[in-house]
Every structure is written in C-alpha cells, then in structure tokens.
Image (spheres, coloured by chain):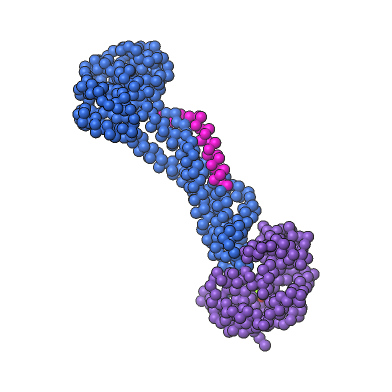
Chain colours: A purple, B blue
Amino acid sequence: MKIIETRELKKTYTLGKVEVNALNGVNALVEEGEFVAIMGPSGSGKSTFLNMVGMLDVPTSGEIYLNGTEITKMEEHARVEYRLRNIGFVFQFFNLFMELTAIENVMFPMMLSGHPFYKERAEELLESVGLKSRINHLPSELSGGEQQRVTIARALANQPKLLLTDEPTANLDTKATHEIMELFRRLNEEKHQTIIMVTHNPELGAKTDRIIHFRDGKVVK
Amino acid sequence: MGLKSDLETALFFAKKDTGKNIRVFALIILAIAFATANIIIINGFMDGFSNSLVDATLDISSGHVNIYPKENDRYIEGLGIKELKLDGMENVAAYSSRLYSSGTLSYNEKTKTIKIVALDPEREQGVTKILEKIEEGEGLTKENEILISYRLAEDLSARAGGEATLVFENGVSKTYRIKGIIRTGATDLDANGVIMYMNEANNALGLSGKASIIMVKLSKRELAEEYRDILKKELEVSKIKVWREEIESITGFMNTVKKITDTVIAVGLFAAAVSVGIIIYVNVIHRRRQIGIMKAIGMKSSLIFTVYLMEALLLAGIGVAAGDALGYIGTKYLETRPFYCPIIKEYISAKFYTYLLYDASIVSTAVVVLAGMYPALMASRTNIIKAIWGT
Ligand SMILES: Nc1ncnc2c1ncn2[C@@H]1O[C@H](COP(=O)(O)OP(=O)(O)OP(=O)(O)O)[C@@H](O)[C@H]1O
Ligand SMILES: [Mg+2]
C-alpha cells in the first residue's frame, strides 16, 4: 500500500528578486513498511522534500498523498493534528527540550495527544532504545548518540505511520552512527515502521531498502 | 484532547521554563511585588489621609447642616430669632453659632496673625468635638480666657496659663489668659486658630446678634438634605451647605493628589510590566528552535501562546501574592506610625482596607499579563522551518 505519493511537487523560494526552485516537479512513491534513503548533492531539495511530506511547509504546486489523503490544502489546525498523530521527526541536532528530562521529552507528544498511559509508554520507549537507565537525565547529561535515541523514542511516541529523519547521524561518531542505524533497521524489520531518511552517507544508504536520488529539485532515474 | 489537559500541559511547560530561569524570575517577581505593594501602601496612605481630613472637618468645623451669611453679607443677621426657631424645631438635636474674625496675638515679644473662632462652649459641645482637643491646660470657663492652637503656641513660645494680648480687626486690644492649647487635626485651625467666647468677641467687635455660621446637628445625618429646604424656609436664609458638601473640597483636593500618586503607581507598574515583557521575549527568542520543534511535533499555536501567557500569569501570581503581603504589612505598620508631612503641616497615617488588596491584585495581574501578550503571540507565530533550520 502506498503511504506517500507526490505528483509534480514544486517549491519555489523567493529571495529578494531571485527565485530558487528547491523542488522542480517531484514524483515520488513510498510503500508502507519501506525504509527509504534520500540522497543527492547539497541543495538538491532533499530537506525541502522532507518538510513538504512532513507537513511542516506547503508546496508551491503539486499534490501530496499521505495514506491516500491529499494534504496540501489541509487547514492549519488539521495539519497540526495530523502531524501529531501520524508523523515522527528526527532532525539533525538539538532536537530535545533542554529543560526536560529524557522521559519528559518522550512524554511530550503523548501529553499533546492525550495518551492515557503516557508515562508507562515513555518508559517502554526509552527502554526499547536502550536508555532505561537514563530516563531521568537531562539532555545535557547525555551523549549525542543517546540524545538522538531519545529523539527517536519521542518521534515514535504516538505510533506514527511515518518516521522522517534528516541526516540524523551527521553529528555523531562512527559507533553512535552505527547504533542509530541499527535502531532504525530494527524498527523497520520488527515493527514495520516506514522510515524516510535523508543522508549523505552512502554506507547508510546501502543499508536501507531503496534509495531515492535527488538532483536539482528532481528525482533522478 | 480536552481543554483541561491542554491547560495542564501548558502549565507543565510554563513551570518548567520558569523553574529553569529561577534567578532572573526571582528579580522579576520582586519587581512585580514592589509595584503591587506600592499600589497598596500609596492608596492606603491616600485613604488614611483623606479620611482623617474628612473626619477632622466633620468633627471640628461642621454640623450636619451649616447655615452661612447671605450672598454679599459678612454675617448672619438676626441670630436671636433664628436660634429661637431652631430651639422649637423637630429633629434639631443641637446647634452652635460661631463668629469668625481675625486679629493678632502677642505673647512676650512675639506677635502672630490669628484666626478668631468665637463660640459658646456649651452649645459647641453639642455639635462638634473641637473643645475636646485640648493638648495642654484646660477648657474655657470665663470670658477672659482663650484657647490657642498648638502651632500658634509653638510660634509664640506660649504656654497654657500665660497672658497674651489680642488685637481685634477694629483695633480694640485686650489681654486674655491662655487657658489651653488645642490640636484639632483641622489644618486651618491648627495653623493659627484662637478660640474664645462668642459674647466676648461680639462685644470687642462692637457687634450684637451676629454669626458667621450656624452649625446644626440633626437627630440623623441622613436628614440633612431634607432639612436644607426646611431651614431655608423657616429661618429665611439663603446659603446652606450640608455636611457632604463641606467635604467636597477635600474630595477635590484628594483627586488632584491622586493624579500624582497614580503617576507614581503607573511608573512602578510600567517598570514591572516591561521587565516581564522583556524577559519572556528574550526567553522566546532563546528558545526559538525548541518552539519550532514543539510545533513540528504537533503542538497547536494556541497552546504555545498559552504556555508563555501562563508564564506571565505564574510570575504575576507569585509577584502579586508577595506584593499583597508586603503591602499589607507595610500599610499596617504605617497605620501605627503616623508621620509628619511638612507640606500640609499635619501628621498623616495610612489606613488598610481589604479592597486595596483586590484592586492592587487585579491591576498588577492585568498589566503583567498584558505585557506577556506580545512575546506569547510572537512565540505562537514562530515559523517552524525557519526556527528549526535557524534561518
Ligand atoms: N527557506 C529557504 N529560503 C530560500 N531558499 C531556500 C530555503 N530553504 C532551502 N532553500 C534553497 O532550496 C534549495 C534546496 O534546499 P534543501 O535544503 O532542500 O537542500 P538539501 O538537499 O537538503 O541540501 P543539504 O544536503 O545541504 O542539506 C537550496 O538551493 C536552498 O538554498
Ligand atoms: Mg538538507
């Protein structure tokens, strides 16, 4: 089943008098349960694409279907609600709320969605990413890799259909990168979590099911 | 998700945020507390001051209804007949006529201009408390005795028991025994008042049956308005003021003073509000990325607005509570410690009323929350993409 489908997706930024075509007619398809990497040169529109699919921004033209629903014309409050329940994000760095402990960070999306057992579930999630002993630590007391694992646990809190991640390991060392990658693999294999990961690292790309290549705001091949 | 859990979530974050910056927030709370206490204490003073002025007027120089001379006349004529009529009137509990005049008083080598208040002590006691205000010496018993105000006594270095020479405005000069020294609380009287017998003054001035005012005390002061017309008709007088009108000048004066104190209060509040606004503003800027992530995850703009507004509310709540306590203690303390105001040459003391707490709390909270509005709005309008990618 198709979880993402985009048709002629375009995004044009206007910087003063200059127009930048960040996306130039992207037609992409992702099946449910796939682990897909997005690769391509810097400035080719990878992050822009992820933002559109993640409903953080609206395209200039084109259509985006999430689970069969066209989302580009959705009202703001409906987008917020849809994001909360269906999409999990892991950004490159500084994802966590610095004044909240690990468990409070993970509880956050569930407090918003009104999950009845958010505390228990947050504990389980942290345990599943191997941070059982760190639940009451502040982000500043955790390593970069541990912080990213908390972020992943938080992204999974409301059991999203889609996990979107933009260069999640760019700031991590090899060992931590490997651990994060293992975590994604496991989530995908065991929980059939659909994951879309933007990366510059070919090694990581090779570990996914499929790579979508971007160039000049378009999907190549 | 329901409103209750929305508010709970907002409160959770507001608390976390506030707790994190506890030192800065402690200062802000202090500013709010002082601004609030400021309102309470200043208004407590104003009330205490205004009440003591009103009390002084009503106790010292006014009846429930006061009769004055006709327009363009200096004195009330035909005093004897008017007093007879008053004697026979229903609801007239007491009345006292006074003659006001001026002159000078000399004691040893010193001389001062004075204001003469001539009255009949027995009648006066039925209407005012002026003769109970003796600070030193005793009350009037003979026609050759006078009472002088404490400030006059100070100025002349006079003491009770001494003899002073009084020169009336018509040049007649006579020596009197200073029987007592009074302090009434009524500003003009305390400045240079001399109290003497009505007959004595009339004689010295070559008058008879004249008065400057007849103060009438009724069985109930609520009857004042009704008796204004009755007295006008029965006594054939034209100028009458009821007690409420007598204090109008004080109310007017107080309103003028209030404009000044309100400015002082506004400055304090403004300072507190601006600091709250700035702190939350800086906080919002500082957390822009986190706010972006909150929104990306699925926090509604309205909830983000609520978080930061709640932060202001939290600060206001703690600050105002502290300010209320401070204001209460301050006002109560000052109630017991009147201080001398050199401008009005009077002792003034504060007076605490519960309404002061309500008023100050509402005003402070409203101002602080209003100040938090802009940064809260700014936070709620954060652009996710720009916040997260730092552009
Ligand atoms: N907010 C913006 N305003 C203007 N131009 C933008 C904005 N965001 C992206 N762009 C431009 O759009 C193009 C695509 O940017 P995008 O961030 O999607 O690239 P990317 O493939 O993620 O690159 P990288 O690998 O460096 O992260 C770039 O030319 C970029 O400069
Ligand atoms: Mg990018």
Q: Position of residue B78 (x, y in %)?
A: 20, 22
* Residue sitting at x 31%, y 28%: B218
* Magenta stretch in the rendered image: B318-345
Residue A87: % across, % down:
64, 72
Residue in front for this viewpoint, B382 or B301: B301
B328 inside magenta stretch: yes
Picture quarter containing residue B122?
Answer: top left
Q: Is residue B75 left or right of residue B386?
A: left
Residue A80 horizontal/vertical position (percent): 58, 69
On the picture, is A221 further left or further right than B214?
A: right
Numbered circles on residues, count:
0
What residue do we see at 37% from left, 14% from top?
B179
Residue positioned most to the front: B90
Seen in the picture, residue A189 relative to B18 is either above or below; the reply is below
Q: Can residue A185 be seen here?
A: no
Pick the quarter of the image with the N terminus of chain B.
bottom right
Residue B199 is at least partly visible in this image: yes
Identity of the residue furthest to the bottom in this view = A221
Q: Is residue B197 left or right of residue A61?
A: left
The vertical placement of A78 against B203, above or below, is below
Query: Magenta stretch mostly in which secondary structure?
Result: helix
Where the C terminus of chain B falls, by quadrant? Answer: bottom right
Q: Nearer the viewer, residue B99 or A198?
A: B99
- Residue at 28 percent across and 18 percent down: it is B198
Q: Residue at x 20, y 24 (%)?
A: B77
**Which image quarter: residue B245?**
top left
As drawn, B329 above or below B272: above
Percent x, y for residue A221? 67, 88
